[in-house]
């Protein structure tokens, strides 16, 4: 059982329609951030610091978007880099929130996919794709998606993957009409 405090926040959530167009919905989050009790891993650790760049930095609760604050992950330059959260059991996930690095190179996250499912190899259904990096906070509605693993993958190119925080919320997420993240 998760014993973290309930968090409340208002977020703009991106959700793709059936034609792949991103729509935004204002979401009220009143739920426990499941990521805080999970285990994070990534394809590689950036070798130039002992603390900066580690996978667990994305679930430490520190949302600072400056890499030098030692709160962000960072992989080596990799083909199809990935970061993964193991929630230790399957949950219905309604929303995933990414905090992007903003002191340098936010465009590196363009095209990244948020995936949710029960496959530990990151071959899970896509909840959403990063289509803009103007804001440091990128929120994705994932209604009805269920899984033990939440991953972020940049498919099809060699890139560094940096995340400053990842949050995952269960199905007690509501929008202004009290509908579950629809």
Image: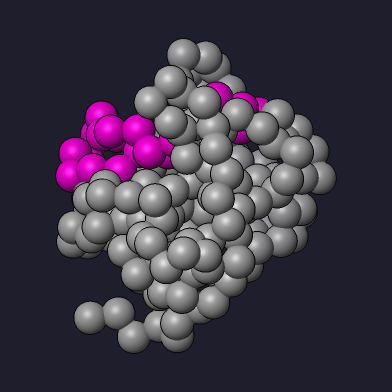
Query: Residue most toward the top?
Result: 156
Whether residue 60 is in magenta: the answer is: no
Query: Residue most toward the right?
Result: 103
Residue at image coords 46%, 75%: 30
Question: Relative to residue 161, is residue 173 depicted above or below?
Answer: below
Residue 181 relative to residue 52: left or right = left
Question: Relative to residue 38, is residue 2 depicted above or below?
Answer: below
Question: Relative to residue 56, is residue 23 depicted above or below?
Answer: above
Residue at image coords 34%, 85%: 3
Location of residue 81 in the rendering, given as x and y in whole percent from the top left corner: 47, 28
Q: Quadrant of the N terminus?
A: bottom left
Location of residue 51 in the rendering, given as x and y in whole percent from the top left corner: 60, 57
Residue 129 relative to residue 93: left or right = right
Whether residue 113 is in magenta: the answer is: yes
Residue 90 relative to residue 181: left or right = left
Near-viewer residue (174 or 46): 174
Which corner quadrant of the image does residue 42 belong to? top left
Location of residue 112 in the rendering, given as x and y in whole percent from the top left corner: 51, 30
Question: Is residue 144 among what the camera can see?
Answer: yes
Q: How many numbered discs sit on the rendered protein?
A: 0
Question: Is residue 54 among what the camera can see?
Answer: no
Residue at image coords 52%, 65%: 176
Residue at image coords 66%, 32%: 132
Location of residue 147 in the rendering, given as x and y in whole percent from the top left corner: 22, 50
Question: Relative to residue 180, is residue 46 depicted above or below?
Answer: above
Query: Which range is magenta?
Result: 108-128
Near-viewer residue (112 or 176): 176
């Amino acid at each position: 059982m998760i014993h973290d405090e309930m968090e409340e926040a208002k977020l703009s959530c991106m959700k793709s329609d059936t034609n792949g167009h991103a729509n935004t919905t204002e979401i009220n989050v009143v739920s426990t951030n499941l990521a805080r009790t999970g285990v994070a891993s990534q394809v590689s650790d950036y070798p130039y610091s002992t603390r900066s760049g580690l996978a667990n930095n994305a679930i430490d609760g520190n949302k600072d978007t400056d890499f030098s604050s030692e709160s962000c992950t960072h992989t080596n330059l990799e083909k199809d880099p990935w970061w993964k959260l193991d929630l230790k059991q399957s949950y219905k996930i309604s929303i995933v929130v990414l905090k992007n690095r903003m002191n340098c190179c936010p465009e590196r996250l363009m095209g990244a996919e948020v995936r949710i499912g029960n496959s530990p190899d990151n071959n899970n259904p896509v909840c959403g794709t990063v289509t803009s990096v103007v804001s440091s906070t990128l929120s994705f509605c994932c209604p009805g998606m269920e899984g033990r693993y939440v991953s972020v993958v940049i498919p099809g190119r060699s890139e560094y993957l940096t995340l400053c925080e990842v949050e995952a919320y269960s199905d007690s997420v509501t929008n202004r009409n009290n509908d579950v993240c629809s």
